[in-house]
Image (cartoon, rainbow, N blue to C red):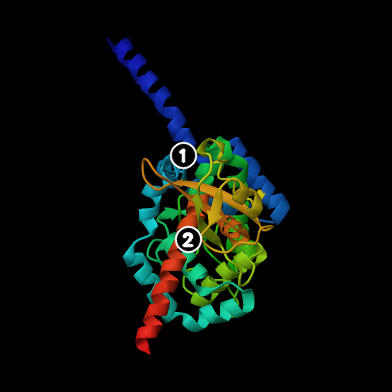
Amino acid sequence: MRHFHLTILALVLALQAPSVFAKSYYAREDVKNFVQYMIDEHGFERTQLKLLFKGVKQQESVLEAIATPAERKKKWFEYRPIFLKQARADAGVKFWRENQAILEQAEEIYGVPPEIIVAIIGVETYYGRITGKYPVFDSLVTLGFGYPKRAKFFLSELEHYLLMCREEGFDPSALKGSYAGAMGMGQFISSSYRRYSVDQNEDGKRDLWGSKEDIIGSVANYFKVHGWKKNQAVASSAQFSGNANNIDDSNTLKPAFNYAQLNQQGFVADMPIASDEEVSLFVLDADKNTKEYWIGQHNFYVITRYNHSHMYAMAVYQLSQEIKKQWILTAQSAN
């Protein structure tokens, strides 16, 4: 009987060992190799990195969340109501009113209209109400060393994160964000933070949590760098009267047609579009049985550089138009 109990105990310990080992990240060879790379390539101190990795807790909820993002598992008629709500539009108008001067300055410098910037912040974090609860360092370590499908990307983000924290004077173990490591009111990942964020208020740091100037300026700069065209349209709903069997419903993000080609197939935009303008076609589920058609223009593609999802970009665009409409009505009623 004693021998039986010892055998069971040994089996239990053997089954537990991998999870215990997995939680002790610094004991892993791949982690040690990464640490050595950061020391050799960027001059980090081994003691600092050792303490950081020893304090990491594997984020199982992060692995679950990244496997089923809303953009992939929901249809448009399910995804749209998450963001297109009256309360969020009202909050957008309030955010615009409170930061009007900053938004106007950003439009003058970067060419991006206030409603687009406001809508991005509204979709990303509900104007700062939901900036993320996950420890960014732990999330990036979990994904970089535990999600093989995108390990290369997240290890690169982990590298950028450590560099960003050193450059900006942040404690790497203190920051929180989304499950994928996006941070602040605009939800910048580490590489985007380093490349596109700006010190708009010129106080010597780029603060995407507390400085409205830096937040708004950084979102606007992101769009400018990715090719936003000032005073150009974004998208148009369209009517269709052709053969439904011939529709290209792949929802390719980058413009792949000119408008004349779509027009020949039976699509007519509800807003004027030049016949030679390069556009994309988006076929969305209005409900379980009905399709709706949208023609995306260059600036729509620019929005997808923020998040590579046509439904995300459509939510941003439609929210921006609702916010703009309410902003105009509010201004008219004030007069």
Compared across the picture, whether 301 is left or right of 131 comes to right
Please indicate, yes or no, whether residue 51 appears anywhere in the rendered image.
no
Q: Earlier in the sequence, mark 2 or mark 1?
A: 1
What is the three-letter code of the residue carrying label 2? Val
Residue 316: numbered disc = 2
Q: Position of residue 91 (x, y in %)?
A: 36, 71
Please indicate, yes or no, whether residue 204 appears anywhere in the rendered image.
yes
Q: Residue furthest left?
A: 1
Q: Quadrant of residue 277?
A: bottom right
What is the three-letter code of the residue carrying label 1? Ala
- Dot 1 falls on a residue whose secondary structure is helix
Q: Quadrant of residue 135?
A: bottom left
Image quadrant in which the C terminus is located: bottom left
Q: Position of residue 198 (x, y in %)?
A: 61, 71
**Which residue matches tag 1?**
67
Q: Residue at x 40, y 28 (%)?
A: 16
The reply to whether discs 2 and 1 touch (Cβ–Cβ < 8 Å) is: no
Please state which of residues 207 and 333 is positioned toward the viewer in this rendering.
333
Q: Position of residue 131 (x, y in %)?
A: 42, 61
